[in-house]
Image (cartoon, rainbow, N blue to C red):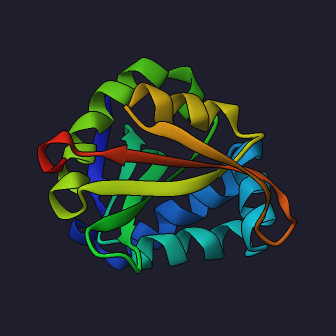
């Protein structure tokens, strides 16, 4: 059974264990995106992302984590940085995952009327999740991150604040 756990409600030792499992099993596209963006190792990137996030959830299939996602504050007021990293299990259940993450997006929008980030142009599966969840593709960035690869700027507005 798929469930979502707020990382702030689980013991740190459990969270670190989940992050290690996720880091060891990330989808190839997510690993490539981490490398292209900043070059941190997957575990370091997940720890940093979770630590900086205002809201963050781990998705579990039974007791096994298969995805982590959340949002962090940006330098602009009322704008959050949305992010997601997952294992191949995430690709097996895209529709179930989308249905279950929409409520979490509403929670993110309760803090940030605008959510945005950049995604590696090679990460088509995550791009499908973004567009299915109502994010808009705004602009192609020809050179982004440490590797200067093509990335895509995306955003989602909470229509209640427009």
Indicate the position of residue 51 as horizontal and vertical percent values: 42, 78
Q: Is residue 97 left or right of residue 89?
A: left
- In the foreground, 27 or 106: 106
Q: Is residue 13 left or right of residue 109?
A: right
- Asked if 56 appears above or below 54 in the picture, the reply is above
Q: Is residue 10 left or right of residue 70?
A: left
Evaluate whether residue 63 shows in this view.
Answer: no
- Asked if 2 appears above or below 70 in the picture, the reply is above
Indicate the position of residue 145 as horizontal and vertical percent values: 76, 68
Indicate the position of residue 126 as horizontal and vertical percent values: 59, 37
- In the foreground, 116 or 14: 116
Indicate the position of residue 102 as horizontal and vertical percent values: 27, 35
- Asked if 145 appears above or below 69 in the picture, the reply is below
Residue at 48% in and 23% down: 94
Residue at 69% in and 57% down: 24
Residue at 38% in and 58% down: 70
């Amino acid at each position: 059974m798929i469930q979502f756990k707020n990382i702030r409600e689980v013991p740190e030792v459990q969270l670190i264990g989940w992050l290690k499992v996720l880091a060891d099993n990330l989808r190839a596209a997510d690993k490539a995106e981490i490398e292209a963006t900043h070059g941190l190792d997957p575990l370091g990137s997940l720890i940093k992302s979770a630590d900086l996030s205002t809201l963050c959830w781990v998705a579990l299939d039974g007791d096994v984590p298969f995805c982590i996602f959340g949002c962090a504050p940006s330098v602009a007021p009322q704008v959050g940085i949305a992010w997601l990293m997952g294992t191949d299990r995430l690709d097996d259940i895209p529709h179930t995952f989308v249905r279950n993450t929409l409520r979490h997006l509403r929670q993110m929008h309760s803090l940030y009327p605008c959510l945005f980030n950049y995604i590696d142009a090679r990460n088509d599966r995550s791009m499908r999740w973004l567009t299915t969840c109502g994010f808009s593709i705004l602009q192609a960035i020809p050179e982004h991150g440490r590797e200067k690869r093509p990335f895509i700027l995306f955003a989602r507005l909470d229509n209640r604040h427009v």
